[in-house]
Amino acid sequence: NDLGEFLGIFAGDGYMNKKENYHYLMSVCIGYYEKDYADYLIKKFEYWFGKAPSINQIMYKSKPSAIVLYYYSKEIHLLIKKYLIWSGRKTYSVKLENFDLNEREFNIGFLRGLIDTDGNYYAPKKKISFSTTSKNLGIQAYKIIKYNLNLEPRWNEYQKEKRAVLYTIYLHGESTKKLMDKVRLANPHKIMR
């Protein structure tokens, strides 16, 4: 589901702001090492929104560090606000406003966007994980994996000193392969080899 995937991408790595001049900024930041995934997103965004995003490359110590894809669009701003809610900093509280396990295809698309942006694949243990500082988002991802994909994810909470709690959902081995088959991740850095 394209809408679910976009919202998962935004929930994972997106930023939104309404400027004083009433310009509605929406951006997604991808690590430069994931340039191939950024290329995928450029094509998808153009397909979804009818025009290519503007692109900015962020440098760190004279080397490319990140790629920012962005739009100034009230329509995209309103679309995001229709489906996602958060208070304060997005990263700590973002979640789907009307989460419904009966919306299986939407939820799988949402999970694809989340894992493509904030997921991690560790090849030696065939382990896939998704981490977030939003407990509600973590619970929603956990429920999608458990009830929409019929898999048994594990849940972990970890907190470094003076940092927010990090909620991680993960799968190992054959369960990872089943998730990959059902969700069809787009980010090549998160795909089992």
Image: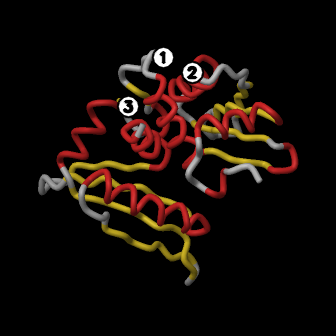
Label 2, secondary structure: give it: helix
Give how far across and how far down residue 132 sits, in percent: 58, 37
User: N-terminal of the two: label 2 or label 3?
Assistant: 3
- Residue 81 shows which numbered tag? none
Q: CA distance from mark 2 to mark 3?
A: 24 Å
Query: Disc 2, disc 1: CB below 8 Å?
Result: yes
Question: Which residue is most to the bottom?
Answer: 62
Alpha-carbon span between mark 2 and mark 1: 7 Å
Q: Residue 148 got which mark?
A: 2
Residue at (51, 60) in percent of width and height: 30
As drawn, is 49 to the left or to the right of 61? left
Q: Dot 3: within a 10 Å radius of its alpha carbon, few (fewer than 14), some, or many (20 or more) residues?
A: some
Q: Dots 2 and 3: beta carbons under 8 Å?
A: no
Q: Is residue 120 left or right of residue 172?
A: left
In the picture, measured across the screen, residue 180 lies left or right of residue 24, that is right
- Residue at label 3? 86
SS of the residue under disc 3: loop
| Disc on the earlier residue, 3 or 1 | 3
Name of the residue lying farthest toward the front: 181
Looking at the rendered structure, the kind of residue marked 1 is: Leu
Residue closest to the eye, 138 or 126: 126
**Depth check, front residue: 132 or 48:** 48
- Tell me which corner region of the image, top left, top right, bottom left or bottom right, holds residue 179: top right
Give, as a three-letter code, the residue at label 2. Answer: Asn
Q: Earlier in the sequence, mark 2 or mark 1?
A: 1
Name the residue located 31 percent from the left edge and 68 percent from the top edge.
54
- Residue indicated by mark 1: 101
